[in-house]
Amino acid sequence: MDKNVLIDRYERLRNQALGKLFTTGQGLGLALFMRKGMVAWAQAWTEHTPKVKRESPQGLDIKNHFPNNINSQITMLLTNMITNLNQ
């Protein structure tokens, strides 16, 4: 599990415990956290959260995602923006 996901869930749990977040039906594990502690809570989230396969940035082929003339299009866009600022 991505550590940022676990950190986000902890912050949501903390807000729930402080009364700043009210959940509707979906528990965040506050009872588990209070009874067994943070380690058990984090372990439960890690074990019961589906693994998401993420491609590394090196594995992405961005050439297929953008048109061939993207550089010239960006240049024209920036030129038009600057020109319109000066008018």
Image: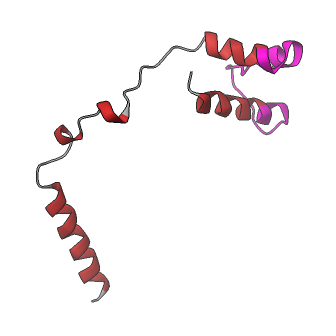
Query: In the figure, is residue 32 to the left or right of 10?
Result: right
Residue at screen point 69% across, 25% down: 24
Please tell me whether residue 40 is drawn above or below residue 3 in the rendered image.
above
Query: In the figure, is residue 83 to the left or right of 3?
Result: left
Query: In the figure, is residue 60 to the left or right of 32?
Result: left
Q: Residue furthest bottom?
A: 87
Q: Nearer the viewer, residue 86 or 43?
A: 43
Residue at screen point 75% across, 32% down: 22
Rendered image quadrant of residue 84: bottom left
Q: Report x, y in % for residue 47.
A: 62, 10
Q: Nearer the viewer, residue 21 or 44?
A: 44
Residue at screen point 65% across, 27% down: 6
**Quarter of the image that includes the N terminus:** top right
Please tell me whether residue 71 is drawn above or below residue 8 in the rendered image.
below
Is 78 one of the magenta-colored residues? no
Query: In the figure, is residue 19 to the left or right of 4?
Result: right
Q: Residue furthest left?
A: 68
Q: Report x, y in % for residue 64.
A: 17, 38
Is 38 one of the magenta-colored residues? yes
Q: Which residues, given as a range, are shown in magenta?
A: 14-39
Q: Nearer the viewer, residue 26 or 31?
A: 31
Q: Report x, y in % for residue 50.
A: 52, 13
Colour setting: secondary structure
**Quarter of the image that includes the C terminus:** bottom left
